[in-house]
Image (cartoon, rainbow, N blue to C red):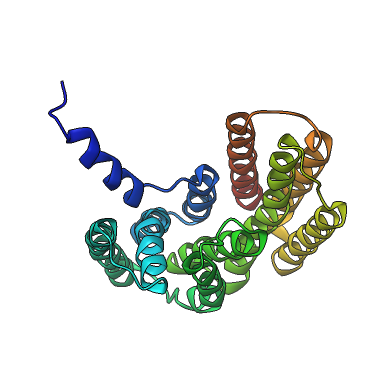
Amino acid sequence: MSAPGEAHTRAPLRTVALPTEHGGWGLSAEPGLLGLLLVPSVAGACLAVAAVLAFVARTPLRFVLVDRHRGRSLPRTALARKVLLAETVVLVALVATAVVTADGAFWWPAVVAAPLVGLELWFDTRSRSRRLLPELAGAVGVSAVAAMIVLAGGHGSAEATSAWLVLAARAITAIPHVRAQILRMHGRPVAASTLVAADACSVVAAAAAVLLEPSMLAGAIAVLVVIGFERLTDRSVAPPTVIGIRQMLLGLMVVVVTALGVHLA
């Protein structure tokens, strides 16, 4: 049986340490998984773990940024700083190991993705992280990890960029459709133009991936399957858990089909 006050002390730690965005787990893990399926390496494994840990670390970072923006220092702020410091140490160790063991330079995707991550953090600081723009920016930004892993394994920039584009295409169509389903569930209006624009951008990104690297054709087709599935289930009523499981399976399908297509090409 828990000691008095034990549950009370656990709750704040869980609040500042664990993300509440369930879909973010899959979006953070997919780039690492795709990268490792394409080009397995020790450096890639370190980057894949670092991507998921960065997603987890975003939670305490958000508390620190929000409280600093509002000019306050709460007990949760100090706890969040401690959690963030511990996770940052592990992140630095993982990236350092990747640098030492990599077969090629892998920094440029991180540089390109930095403004997207910065935009997401800007919204986080103002407690507006649940809006469409920061969610898309964060998902496309973290997809750069796939490109970093491919480069760390010694493969070329075309393959790296194409892997990034396939995952970006998957995220660009998935996030607006998931938001639309949740909005409809609560009886709120959905702008059809937003969904059309998202699907169009997704198709463009998938096509660009194939133009850069023809072996990504299977991945591009998988993205089109996701778009079709989203359209068919767009107005269906399902609990958030079911929606989350669907998205996890769709993401896994895109990753596996993309990797198989590249290896069989």
Residue at 14 percent of width and 30 percent of height: 4
Residue at 83 percent of width and 60 percent of height: 197
Residue closer to the observer: 247 or 225: 247
Residue at 58 percent of width and 55 percent of height: 130
Instruction: In the displayed orientation, state which residue is furthest to the left.
Output: 3
Residue at 51 percent of width and 68 percent of height: 126
User: Which quadrant of the view contains residue 178?
Assistant: top right
* Residue 81 picture location, percent across and down: 26, 63
User: Which quadrant of the view contains residue 50?
Assistant: bottom left
* Residue 22 picture location, percent across and down: 51, 42
Instruction: In the displayed orientation, state which residue is furthest to the top.
Output: 1
* Residue 244 picture location, percent across and down: 59, 36
Q: In this view, does 112 lie to the left or right of 254?
A: left
Residue closer to the observer: 155 or 22: 22
Q: Quadrant of the N terminus?
A: top left
Image: 174 above or below 107: above
Total marks placed: 0
Residue closer to the observer: 129 or 43: 129
* Residue 155 picture location, percent across and down: 51, 68
Residue closer to the observer: 89 or 49: 89
